[in-house]
Image (cartoon, grey):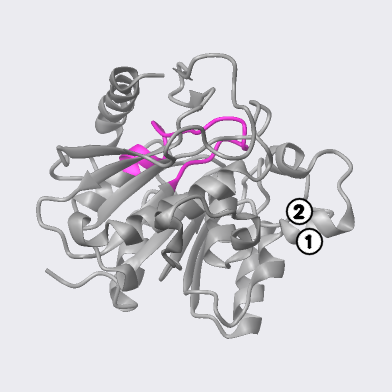
Amino acid sequence: MDLKRRNFLAGVALVAAASQAQAAATEIDTTIEIINLWPGQPPGGAGPTQSEDLTPRGALRQISTPRLIVHRPDKPSGAAMLLCSGGGYRKVDIVNESTPAAIYFASRGITAVELVYRVPQEGWSIHAPFLDGMRALKIMRAQSERLGIHPARTGILGFSAGGHLAGMLATGAAESFYVPTDDIDNQVMKPAFAALLYPVITMMAPFDQTQSRLNIIGRHPTQDLREDFSVERQVSRDTPPIFLAHALDDPIVPVDHSLMMFQALRSAGIDTEIHVFQSGGHGWGMGKARPDVISWAQLAETWLRFNGMLTTS
């Protein structure tokens, strides 16, 4: 897919998401940049045979050119955030999740970087999303001066399956999948924080009945695969502070996923904060259509300030 079409799709997603974010952002960031992750064919499979498209509900499919969509704030604080949308590792739901969140956080002085990552079942390996996530962090580190971001205040935020991806990156579990390709891969970039929204965390029974588990490790995974891709099993003393938010009535990813992660973080002595909303379901994004959970972004912003990631203006 050529650059013109990629720009078009990014623009369509941004315009569609802008109306959803009006209540959250007082001013929509207009400085948008697209950065391809890989020089040429990405590693990890042959890729889809069809052209990339945007579904009527705002999700990208058939992704063959993984990339970053950078939202640069008018008044950058130096903080930065890589945003990973969900979609069950079948699609990337940018219009409902990462784009409106990027608009909100850019309005708060955070350089917000959307990750358009590849998914299995479209000709890519199960490692492709994690390769893209690792590469994204390395590019952000390599270009930190140009982008005006401080690596020590650069973190990651993920929704649903994107929360699983973010958790694998934050705990360092994805590093074992990575094979360097060029000088950018000499960069070391560990997230300084993570925010996980209604995340997929575990691949262990009885809470493994998610589409993400099916698309990553299959119907009959080995015990080793289950453990390797269960984020709560990867928590260590090196894990950064993590913010969690989930709805008690989530019918897609049970709240137990976040509770398990919270307990793992507490046991490891990692700074953490959790918000369990009485209702809200799943896939709320910025929460405009779910008033019970709409406060999550403000809560996350307060948490970032408390942990020194976002300075007070």
- Pick the quarter of the image with the C terminus: bottom left
Q: Quadrant of residue 217?
A: top right
- Residue flagged by tag 2: what amino acid is it? Met
Is residue 151 toward the left or the right of residue 97 in the image? left
Horizontal and vertical percent position of residue 126: 68, 41
Is 288 left, or right, of 110 in this rendering? right
Image height of 261 relative to 60, above or below: below
The residue under label 1 is 227
Q: Do tag 2 and tag 1 residues touch (Cβ < 8 Å)?
A: yes
Q: Which mark is residue 304?
A: none
At 20% from the left and 62% from the top, the residue drawn is 145
Residue 41 lies, with reference to residue 249, above or below; the image says above
Q: Name the N-terminal-most of marks 2 and 1.
A: 2
Stretch of the chain drawn in magenta: 84-101
Question: Around disc 1, counting alpha carbons within 10 Å, would you say few (fewer than 14), some (14 to 19), or many (20 or more)?
Answer: some
Q: Residue at x 50, y 27 (%)?
A: 64
Residue 52 within the segment the image draws in magenta: no
| Residue at image mark 2 | 203
Q: Quadrant of the N terminus?
A: top left
**Overall secondary structure of the magenta section:** loop
Residue at coordinates 68% horizontally, 51% vertically from top-left? 254
Q: What is the three-letter code of the residue carrying label 1? A: Glu
In the rendering, at what x and y percent does residue 54 appear?
A: 44, 19
**Which SS class for mark 2?**
loop
Q: Residues within 10 Å of mark 2 (few under 14, many from 20)?
A: many
Residue 89 falls within the magenta-colored stretch: yes
